[in-house]
Image (cartoon, rainbow, N blue to C red):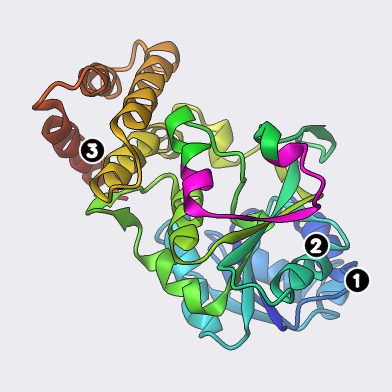
């Protein structure tokens, strides 16, 4: 099976590590597409000229200008550039790193003959220097399983993530997707409720509703915490949306009959507590904490009030 790597490029700081990860693959990608969203086009320029250009030239590389309309719009732009021309594709963020067997292991997952929507491998969280410092909060039943590769369906996936406001799966960088499920990246809602801000977990759940996910136990790369990424900007719009996105997933999945009331209440109460702890003095977030506590207490009008506030938040921040 052929794999295309899609790189939504913005930060040039980790370009050498990105190239090293791609060049040292035991089974490299057949095509690498870069959509350069850097403000001055510096990412693409460094790939064409300078000390890293000779390494970049060893890759089957295409460089295109990005839409400059936000990170997720760049994801969708890349999918259009790819055009479904390989069985598998991988969205590789520019500050994450994949280890040499990443593509080899993911190809194996897709070659088992089982119908799967995507494959997700465990990964490390690393510090700014790229040193692994912690793993993911993988559920005990999966972490202690004898199988190194296992199938995860929607019931197990939803029940182990949204009620506990916890994404143990990771990001797009540690996921390889089958071509036929690419359209899910453009349909970021459940039951008419947008899950903007939690695009990765929302996609994983949406994919699992079509076909199971193949989960690979081996840690085949790392996510870089801190630095210039959205996760380091705690008070930024993306991290705030990521918090509220769990509640949005709860509402949407409950509408679809995929979450029960007790699971939803657990989610709403958990996010309300997190908002009070992390954003206690911020006027834009405190109303959500109150709303979510009302939802946890099954206030009849709280759900509609949340939806109105959530839509206003998304519109205000340009999601």
Lower position in the chain sequence, tag 1 or tag 2: 1
* x then y, percent, for residue 205: 46, 53
Q: Where is mark 1, residue-wise?
A: 26
Lower position in the chain sequence, tag 2 or tag 3: 2
User: SS at mark 3?
Assistant: helix
- For image coordinates 32% across by 36% down, the residue present is 260
Front one among 106 and 151: 151
Foreground disc of the pair 2, 3: 2
Q: Where is mark 3, residue-wise?
A: 310
* x then y, percent, for residue 252: 28, 46
- Compared to residue 77, the image places residue 134 above or below, namely above
- Compared to residue 68, the image places residue 264 above or below, namely above
Disc 2 from disc 3: Cα separation: 37 Å
* Marks 2 and 3 in Cβ contact (< 8 Å): no
Q: Which mark is residue 89?
A: none
User: Hey, which quadrant is residue 294 in on the image?
Assistant: top left
- Compared to residue 314, the image places residue 164 above or below, namely above
Q: Which residues are magenta?
A: 142-158
Whether residue 225 is visible to the viewer of this picture, yes or no, is no
Q: Where is mark 2, residue-wise?
A: 102
* Marks 1 and 3 in Cβ contact (< 8 Å): no
* x then y, percent, for residue 197: 41, 44
Disc 1 from disc 2: Cα separation: 8 Å
Q: Residues within 10 Å of mark 2 (few under 14, many from 20)?
A: many
Report the side of 184 relative to 104 (left or right). left
- For image coordinates 43% across by 60% down, the residue present is 209
Front one among 103 and 112: 112
Disc 1 from disc 3: Cα separation: 45 Å
Whether residue 256 is visible to the viewer of this picture, yes or no, is yes
């Amino acid at each position: 099976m052929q794999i295309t790597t899609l790189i939504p490029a913005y930060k040039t700081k980790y370009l050498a590590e990105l190239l090293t990860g791609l060049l040292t693959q035991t089974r490299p990608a057949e095509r690498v597409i870069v959509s350069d969203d850097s403000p001055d086009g510096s990412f693409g320029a460094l790939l064409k000229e300078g000390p890293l250009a000779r390494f970049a030239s060893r890759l089957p590389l295409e460089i295109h200008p990005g839409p400059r309309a936000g990170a997720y719009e760049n994801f969708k732009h890349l999918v259009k550039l790819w055009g479904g021309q390989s069985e598998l594709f991988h969205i590789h963020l520019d500050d994450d790193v994949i280890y040499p067997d990443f593509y080899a292991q993911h190809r194996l997952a897709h070659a088992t003959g089982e119908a799967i929507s995507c494959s997700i491998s465990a990964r490390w969280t690393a510090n700014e220097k790229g040193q692994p410092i912690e793993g993911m909060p993988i559920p005990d039943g999966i972490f202690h399983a004898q199988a190194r590769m296992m199938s995860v369906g929607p019931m197990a996936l939803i029940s182990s993530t949204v009620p506990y406001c916890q994404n143990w799966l990771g990001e797009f960088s540690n996921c390889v997707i089958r071509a036929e499920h690419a359209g899910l990246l453009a349909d970021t809602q459940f039951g008419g409720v947008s899950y903007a801000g939690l695009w990765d977990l929302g996609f994983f759940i949406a994919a699992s509703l079509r076909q199971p996910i193949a989960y690979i136990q081996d840690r085949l790369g790392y996510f870089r915490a801190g630095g210039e990424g959205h996760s380091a900007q705690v008070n930024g719009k993306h991290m705030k949306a990521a918090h509220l996105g769990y509640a949005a997933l709860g509402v949407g999945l409950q509408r679809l009959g995929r979450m029960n009331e007790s699971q939803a209440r657990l989610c709403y109460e958990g996010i309300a507590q997190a908002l009070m702890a992390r954003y206690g003095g911020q006027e834009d977030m405190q109303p959500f904490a109150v709303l979510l506590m009302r939802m946890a207490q099954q206030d009849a009008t709280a759900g509609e009030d949340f939806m109105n506030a959530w839509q206003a938040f998304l519109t205000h921040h340009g999601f």
